[in-house]
Image (cartoon, grey):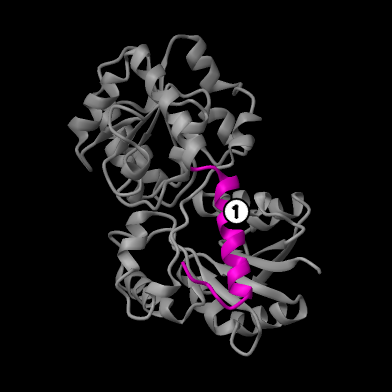
Amino acid sequence: MSAVKVLQLGSPAGLYGAERWILALVRHLDRSQFEPVVGVIRDDPSLDAPLCAQARAFGMQDCIIDAPGRINWSAVGKLREFINANDIRILHTHFYKTDLIGLFAVRGTRCKILSTPHGWSTQAGLMLRLYEGLDRAIFPFFDAVAPLSEALYDDVKGLPGLRRKLHLIRNGVDISEIDAVPQASGEVREWREQGAFVIGYLGQLIHRKGIAVLIEAFAKLDVPGKKLALIGEGPQRAEFEALAARLGVSADVRFFGFRSDRLALLRAFDVFALASRLEGIPRCLMESMAAHVPIVASDIPGCNDLITDGETGLLFELDNVADLTAKLQRMQDPALRATLAANGRKHVVESYSAASMARQYQDLYARMIDGQPRP
């Protein structure tokens, strides 16, 4: 019997948390049972669709559907045509756009559809709130919905008609990928060799990630030789660069932009700091824990699912600059950092591996094909 084709439909923009989640999942699927296909709906012709490029590098089939605009309904017909032509049996969607287009595209086909919510926006504009509200409203029409954290599960479990289709499958990180990464060379490594205390962040440069709070806390930190490494891109980068300049810390804050060697840079941090206001289960935190890097993170659902304060990391009160500064100050203690790093690594290996996540999805895929997606 041939393997069942499963199409993962992600974002064309970059390789951030959700896109790396998709890559971790497809790399650990048993290809004798499930053949992964990776696709995107490209709403901007200038985007390179790195998710698809990475899938091709893994030897997987990919699909780029060009449909400019926030919601371009021509994508429905194009996606349905690809599903039928390639005998896709399961469409696995991520975020509101692929959910909306995917649900219409599978109509009239034998393809089942599954959504994994990764989280919803905060402080969003009216149109985005409407789209994300519509996204949750259509979940009962899916064959299955698999939130990746308890908080996301609780957020949708009360929707009428959804409970029997709902499956909690926790986020997972590719431990083997992180273990294979060498130590970073270049500026971050040089900082460490010169005795600097390096605080790092890896992800999008957007308001939801609390970058301004992190920069303000860093500016107040009384630590000789402190450095802040911000790895990633986003529309607010210039705004955060201006903030660092106003606070007089530009010389000690480095904006690295997107880096293909992000995990190598991560391994050179003394501390990983995440001041985010909304998360599912943050992949960046799992990667840090797997890389033996201790963490300071905001005390919000998702972060506190992963971190027990004082055991596997330190938590600070959301948006509280003084509390974040105090927790970063505590991280000056090498013994504390070593303990938190060891506990964090043990926790993520035991409870949040991509291999375990993939096995759970394979079981759900099999039940969907059999017509019985029950918990």
* Picture coordinates of residue 280, whole percent (x, y): 39, 53
Give the magenta range.
Answer: 352-375
Could you tell me which secondary element the residue under label 1 belongs to? helix
Say which residue label 1 marks: 359
- Considering only vertical position in the picture, is 44 above or below 179? below
Q: Give x and y (percent) for residue 319.
A: 22, 42
Q: Residue at x 57, y 59 (%)?
A: 361
Image quadrant containing the N terminus: bottom right
Instruction: Between residue 176 and residue 265, name the one nearer to us.
Output: 176
Q: Name the residue furthest top.
A: 194
271 on left or right of 122: right
Vertical position of residue 279 compared to residue 71: above or below: above
In this view, the residue in front, 318 or 346, is 346
Q: Residue at x 30, y 59 (%)?
A: 122
Of 106 and 47, the residue lying toward us:
106
Mark 1: few, some, or many residues within 10 Å (few <14, many ≥20)? some
The reply to whether the magenta stretch includes residue 371 is: yes
- Check the image and name the residue furthest to the right: 1
Residue 94 at x, y percent in the picture: 51, 64
In this view of the protein, can residue 192 be seen by the observer? yes
Say which quarter of the image contains residue 212: top left
The disc labelled 1 sits on which kind of residue? Arg
- Taking the image as shown, residue 257 lies to the left or right of residue 27, namely left
Task: Report whether 136 appears left or right of 62.
Answer: left
